[in-house]
Amino acid sequence: MKKFFLISALILFSGLTQAQICPVVITHVVNGNQVQYYGSCSSNPSGWSWFFNGGSPLTSSQQNTVVNYSAPGQYITALSVYGGPNSCSASLSNKNDTVVILPTGIDNNVADVFSMTVISSSHPTLEIINNKMQKVKITLQDLNGQLIETVFEGELNQGKNSLSMQTFNLPAGVYLISLSKEDGVVSKRVLIQ
């Protein structure tokens, strides 16, 4: 009888799964005071739990979500995942992220047919949507308008264009990206971390 009880207990115990630590990755794209957040986890969790300090909405249960911030500043975001085939533990499977919202008075679109989004990081990426092929010049300047370097000069194709910047020699801080084209200039602030 003891042998049967011990075998039954081992079978029952081995069928239970322990909560796991699941790797969580947060990425974000800042556009003015709006941020698109993307959550990813290779463990295929069944639930997502976001908290956006100072954001609207304050929380979300979606994997990817858009959040608005009413004022410039530095905001902390937290994401926890849970469940799924690997039994992710929300208290163990989480990640924090910090986003910086800059004053948006300088951001603009020219003639509603052209836009430039700057993804701030240690290697900023410019995403440019262009309604036609045209010659452009993209420069990086300090906040006083002093030219630091010409990032790109040439023709941009119609549609979406992406350009990564190498910023190894620049100190961390806020800079201006200016794009001159046939019918105007678009300027955005970029945070180099």
Image (cartoon, grey):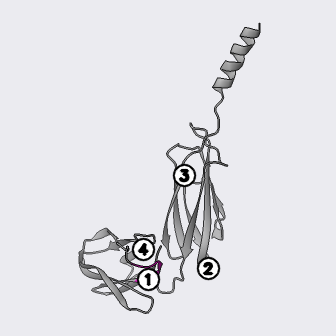
**141 left or right of 136?**
right
Report the residue marked by disc 1: 175
**41 left or right of 91?**
left
Q: Looking at the image, which residue is at 55% across and 53% down?
A: 63
Q: Earlier in the sequence, mark 2 or mark 4?
A: 2
The residue mark sitting in front, 1 or 4, is 1
In which quadrant will I find the N terminus?
top right
Q: Looking at the image, which residue is at 59% across and 79% down?
A: 72
The residue mark sitting in front, 3 or 4, is 3
Vertical placement of 168 versus 180: above or below? above
Spatial distance from mark 2 to mark 1, Cα to Cα? 19 Å
Report the residue marked by disc 2: 71
Spatial distance from mark 3 to mark 2, Cα to Cα? 28 Å
Would residue 130 be counted in the magenta stretch? no
Checking the image for residue 24, the label placed there is 3
Under mark 2, the amino acid is Ala
Structural crowding at the residue carrying mark 2, measured as other residues with C-alpha within 10 Å and reported as few (<14), some (14–19) or many (≥20): few
The magenta segment: 170-176
Spatial distance from mark 1 to mark 4, Cα to Cα? 11 Å
Q: Earlier in the sequence, mark 1 or mark 4?
A: 4
Checking the image for residue 118, the label placed there is 4
Q: Earlier in the sequence, mark 2 or mark 1?
A: 2
Under mark 3, the amino acid is Val
Q: Earlier in the sequence, mark 3 or mark 4?
A: 3
Residue 176, given in percent of the width and then of the height, sits at 42, 84
Residue 101, given in percent of the width and then of the height, sits at 55, 76
